[in-house]
Amino acid sequence: MKTWVALAVGTGLLLSGQAVDAKADKKETKWKLVWSDEFQAKQLDRTKWTYDTGNWIKDANGQPVSPGWGNNEKQYYTTKQDNSFIRNGKLVIKAKQEKTTDDLGTYDYTSAKLKTKGLFSKTYGRYEIKAKLPTGKGLWPAFWMLPEQDKYGVWAASGEIDVMEAWGSQPDKVAGTIHYGENWPNNKYTGKDYHFPDGQRIDQWHTYAVEWEPGELRWYVDGNLYQTQNDWYSKGLNAATNYSYPAPFDQNFYLVMNLAVGGWFDGEVDATTKFPAEMEVDYVRVYDLKNRAYREPVEPTYENVTLPDGAKQPIDGNLVYDTAFEKPVTMITGNQSFDPLYWNYATLPDFGGKGSLAIIEKEGQRMADVTIDQPGSQTYSHQLIQNVSLAQGGRYQVSFDASSTVDRKMMVKVGGGAERGYTKYSNEQSIALTPSVKRHTFTFDMAAETDLAARLEFNLGLEKAGVQIGNVRVEQIPRGVIDEDATKPALPDGNLVYNGTFDQGAMDRLTYWHFDGSKRTTGSVDPESRDFRYEGHGQKTTARLTQKGLQLEAGHAYQLRFTAGAKKAKSLQVKITGAQEQLKQTTVPLTKQATTVDIPFTATQTADDNQLVFDFSGQAGKISLDDVELIDVTPVPVDPSPLKNGSFANGLTSWSSYVHYDAQAAIEAVNEAARIKIGAEGQEPWSVLLEQGNLSLAKGKTYELSFTASSTVPRPIEVTVENASYTRYFSQVEPITTTPKTYSYTFTMGQADTGALKFLMGRAEGSPFAAHDVTIDDVNLKVKE
């Protein structure tokens, strides 16, 4: 049958599908095959498929970053025919229980992961697989898609589309999911499960498909539509706002299919799991629309959402009750039930937290005062929690007052409970606290399904300093509104111009910019090249592109940089002006080839309402403009010793720590040294982490790094200096022993950046270790003389 279908499609047979918009309602949507593998050859077609191998995620330089493919998976992927082969016209991916070893570790299972990266990728279409999947606890078969290029940032800012993934222990259902948002760990996901009719299971033949159009994804099982997704976003580390919709799902994605063993999705295998386990694939097919154009993307619009009956409704707009802590706080130390309406303080013994809570008056308000006797092994060893009801599609603002007995950090998030896998609805916000009460605010969009028992969590573990919290509010606020002309503090990369790459904000990609032109002029962003395009007819035209709200400081040196090119047009004018002229009007000659323009100047006045103006008046022809940057290049004094409290004389002041939920560790200062008491090191190098951030590192400077370390059990630790996007300027794996030893290194900064020194004490070569203590002291980071 497969051979006939392939031949018939080649002669014009079209696959019919469900109508999806008003235009298509009049006729049935049809698809035409454009790529497939029917697995009719004796061996896998290597012009269509390649492999991922090993057990580790590696960076662009081939250096190991994370074991278990970031999911705690136990299999080692191979290219061997034992693990992937063709049998009777079907592809077989076989997971075997067998030991294998590489230079990074030893693994108990082998399997295969096939992909089309570098061979085939596509934007939009119908992606379909017919497969029979294995059952058994810990088996995780999947057919999914990743971006050919990380156009918007590393995972998951550039997106992931899961066409189908299945739990081996739950053979009556599969899932379809999208991953998006920001770089990990601030990623988001939304999706839905499909439950088979009675009597059907994943170990029978089924067809799984996604239909992907601009601004819409639709999931099918055996032709049954079971979910549609339209709401997502992507935001870069240095972006002023989200990339323009429908990013990240507007670029080429390649195909992946694999059979994983273990991992967080379906847990570990047990005695009931039978090996070898096989995932069989009859075909993989990709189609393009034939009888109509792809739908036009429609940017999501949002209104204030309404909570259903039975929800915890807001009082005076606030979803948090008892903001003054006038009712008793429920203390959770074991299996007690959480109060569904009011405050709960949880110190669960499994995570080693011990403390107490009192209500105090501080700086004119009632606050919860948490005293921490034992900080525990996790940020969530101490939690102040209140349930709130959140509606899908709402934008929410969280605000609160907080302080601490000494400088420290706490983690705040809004997420689901156990029944939702503790999924994050907001980012995990790291909040810096001081002895003075300060107001903190963050916002998030509720992309998940409505949750009537979402958890607002103040996670206070890992540090011994007490915390005070008060005046807590969670309020629904309007979505999609940006004050484009408001004053603009510098972005994380130092750029004072917002959306200088013309790929952010509204779908016209001109958010933060104003184009004003006379007749016979146009100004818009090219949707493919994502640069601004001006076109004028006649030399009596007037046209300007302006951005308002730029902050400049008197006497500071600035560099304005952009790329520009032209066809017929000869030049453009540029200036920066406010109450005074900051950059005098400058004529920039243009050529056909887009070139980079640098204009240095010194600000004449401190003001936060300056305007950057590109003036195209009088120019007949076309002008392109892109990559606009305005950087403060005033020389700043180099901090010769950016790291503070390296002797731990002030406890863990200036330091922060992290313990992933797969690890057990307590980090504290003992005898003026950092002691990391590790019960289980987890599955990632960063599962146990001690770091100091906000290190101002100067371009071209060579730094000397030294520290003293020992461990009650000999083991390696990893030491890195990296920025917020995990770019490493220094990395070293160092074996440490029971005898304290001083380690010294040098590295040179190729660029100015704000970095963090990190000691990674999670999984390493030789894991797992017995329970042990790591001691770190006398940490120094200074400019080499």
Image: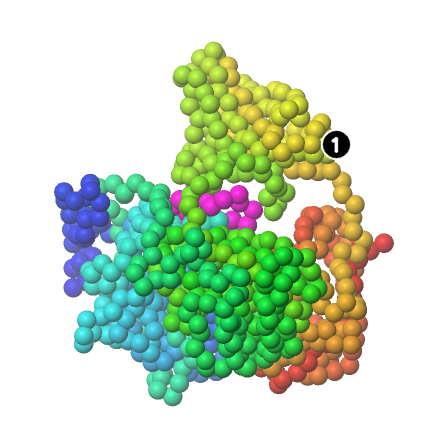
Q: Which residues are magenta?
A: 236-248
Task: Say which residue appears at 63% left-offset and 57% top-offset.
Answer: 364
Q: Residue tagged by mark 1?
A: 555
Task: Say which residue appears at 50% left-offset and 56% top-offset.
Answer: 473
Q: Determine whether 122 is above or below 773 in the image.
A: above
Q: Nearer the viewer, residue 556 or 365?
A: 365
Q: Nearer the viewer, residue 172 or 547?
A: 547
What x and y, as percent, mark residue 451? 37, 63
Q: Is residue 384 visible?
A: yes
Q: Residues within 10 Å of mark 1 (few under 14, many from 20)?
A: few
What x and y, as percent, mark residue 311? 35, 62
Secondary structure type for disc 1: loop
Q: Nearer the viewer, residue 514 or 162?
A: 514
Question: Which residue type does callout 1 highlight?
Answer: Gly
Q: Determine whether 50 is above or below 79 in the image.
A: above
Q: Nearer the viewer, residue 302 or 259?
A: 302
Image quadrant holding the C terminus, namely: bottom right
Residue furthest to the top in view is: 540
Residue 382 occupies quadrant: bottom right
What x and y, as percent, mark residue 85? 34, 71
